[in-house]
Amino acid sequence: MARAIRQISKQAPNVEEEQAQAAADLMRQLTENKDAVIAGIQVMKGLNDMGIFDALRGMLDNRTEVGAIAMQQLNQPATHNVIKAGMFGIQFLSTLQLGQLETVMNGVGLGMKRLSKTGQEGEKQSIWKMRRRLRSPEIRAAMTAMVDFMEGMGEAFLHNKKHNE
């Protein structure tokens, strides 16, 4: 029958062995990721040459003053308006359906091409020719879309006016 184990001696790792193991692990990682390490060093050298690290070091040394200036700038009414406008823009974009947005943007793109073509050629049209063009299905579709757009915009203006009163 075997003797019972009554005492367990914990072996403390040797500091030199730990350092040697850490150095070996580090060298293995460096050799496995050689390209990434070299690219990272090149990026850091470029940033250092540009003075970015000096600027960052200066900002860290003066972080309380830099933080106070940043908070003062963020607390300006113009900054509040920019943040609100950004939020409204995101809200507006989230209400649009992708198909609608694609149709409108394609229309704007084609309209801009025609506009630049007309601007380059500089051809003036008579009132009679423009009147004839108003009968084309493309112009009627665009005019209908613009009138619907203006009607919706006017509806929102009136609703906002009633809400504010």
Image (cartoon, helix red, strand yellow):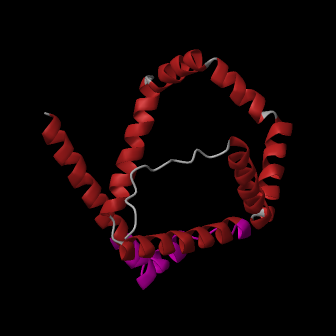
Q: Quadrant of residue 119?
A: bottom right
Depth check, front residue: 118 or 6: 6
User: What quarter of the picture does the C terminus occupy?
Assistant: top left
Residue ID at (39%, 51%): 6
Q: Is residue 84 above or below residue 18?
A: above
Residue ID at (45%, 50%): 8
Q: Residue furthest bottom?
A: 137
Q: Residue furthest front?
A: 1
Count the labels in the image.
0
Report whether 68 appears left or right of 91. Answer: right
Depth check, front residue: 105 or 40: 40
Q: Residue 152, image x and y in percent?
A: 26, 59
Q: Is residue 128 above or below residue 62?
A: below
Depth check, front residue: 57 or 15: 15
Report whether 14 appears left or right of 49. Answer: left
Residue ID at (71%, 54%): 21
Q: Residue 147, image x and y in percent?
A: 32, 65
Q: Quadrant of residue 53?
A: top right
Report whether 77 appears left or right of 161. Answer: right
Q: Main secondary structure of the magenta part?
A: helix
Q: Residue 49, image x and y in percent?
A: 86, 38
Q: Is residue 127 magenta?
A: yes
Q: Residue 162, image x and y in percent?
A: 13, 41
Please state the extent of the stretch shown in magenta in the rendering. Answer: 120-144
Q: Is residue 130 magenta?
A: yes
Q: Is residue 143 above or below residue 78?
A: below
Residue ID at (72%, 46%): 19
Depth check, front residue: 163 or 98: 98
